[in-house]
């Protein structure tokens, strides 16, 4: 490595940082805490071996994952990153439950609104029919005649002169 300062790993291990240091690109001297956590959990030798076994394009991601897992283990020695995952899963379940509740409230509100619209339409129809009923006698002016004079007279006569009602004689 063409640098005058040692990487955080070599500083922590109190050794000279070689030109081909595997840890130098992933543990810069500006962030010594990152390597301290990884060293505490995985150890320097294991970290070096894991990184050496990976292709170069995957090493940065692996170093980030080791750093995250190590810092999670330092903060929560029992659960580590699994504790964070569990908390996130609980939050997802709570959010899904809240979403279901909100969707049901929206559906209920929409149903109520639809019923109210139907009731309003029915009331408008009733009012329109009632208005037509009130206007019916006024449709025929004095110059116009009843369009069904014989029908109304015949119904009246049948009603008054009938000796039977529902098959019973009087």
Image (tube, helix red, strand yellow):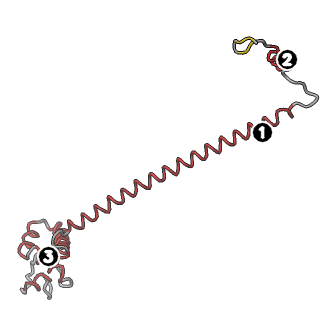
Quadrant where the N terminus is found in the figure: bottom left
Residue 30's disc number: none
In front here: 162 or 152?
162
Image coordinates of residue 49 in percent, x first then y, are: 6, 70
Quadrant of the rendered image containing residue 169: top right
Per the model, the C-alpha gap separating discs 1 and 2 is 26 Å
Q: Secondary structure at mark 1?
A: helix
**Residue at x-position 93% and y-position 30%:** 142
- In the displayed structure image, the side of residue 13 where residue 162 appears, left or right: right
Up-down: is 27 above or below 89? below
Marks 1 and 2, the one that precedes in the sequence? 1
Q: Quadrant of residue 81?
A: bottom left
Disc 2 designates what residue? 150
Q: CA distance from mark 2 to mark 3?
A: 107 Å
Residue linked to disc 3:
38
Residue drawn where x is 65% and y is 40% of the image: 122
Disc 3 element:
helix
Quadrant where the image shows the C terminus: top right
Q: Nearer the viewer, mark 2 or mark 3?
A: 2
Q: Which tag is nearer the camera, tag 1 or tag 3? A: 1
Q: Nearer the viewer, residue 29 or 42?
A: 42
The image position of residue 162, as x and y in percent, is 79, 13
For the residues labelled 1 and 3, the Cα–Cα distance comes to 86 Å
Q: Nearer the viewer, residue 61 or 38?
A: 38
- Locate residue 152, reporting x and y percent: 83, 20
Does the CB distance between marks 1 and 3 fall below 8 Å?
no
Horizontal and vertical percent position of residue 127: 73, 41
From the image, tell me which residue sits under label 1.
131
Asked if 29 appears above or below 93 in the picture, the reply is below
User: Helix, strand, or loop for circle 2?
Assistant: helix
CA neighbours of label 1 inside 10 A, class few (<14), some (14 to 19), many (20+) = few
């Amino acid at each position: 490595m063409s640098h005058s300062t040692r990487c955080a790993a070599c500083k922590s291990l109190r050794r000279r940082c070689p030109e081909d240091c595997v840890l130098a690109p992933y543990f810069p001297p500006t962030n010594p805490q990152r390597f301290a956590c990884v060293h505490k959990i995985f150890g320097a030798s294991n970290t070096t071996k894991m990184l050496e076994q990976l292709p170069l394009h995957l090493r940065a991601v692996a170093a980030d994952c080791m750093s995250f897992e190590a810092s999670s283990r330092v903060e929560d020695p029992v659960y580590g990153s699994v504790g964070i995952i569990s908390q996130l899963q609980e939050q997802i379940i709570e959010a899904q439950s809240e979403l279901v509740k909100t969707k049901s409230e929206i559906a209920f509100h929409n149903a109520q609104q639809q019923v109210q619209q139907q009731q309003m339409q029915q009331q408008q129809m009733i009012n329109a029919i009632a208005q037509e009923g009130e206007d019916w006698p006024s449709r025929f002016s004095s110059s116009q005649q009843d369009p069904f004079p014989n029908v109304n007279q015949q119904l009246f006569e049948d009603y008054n002169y009938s000796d039977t009602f529902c098959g019973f004689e009087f």
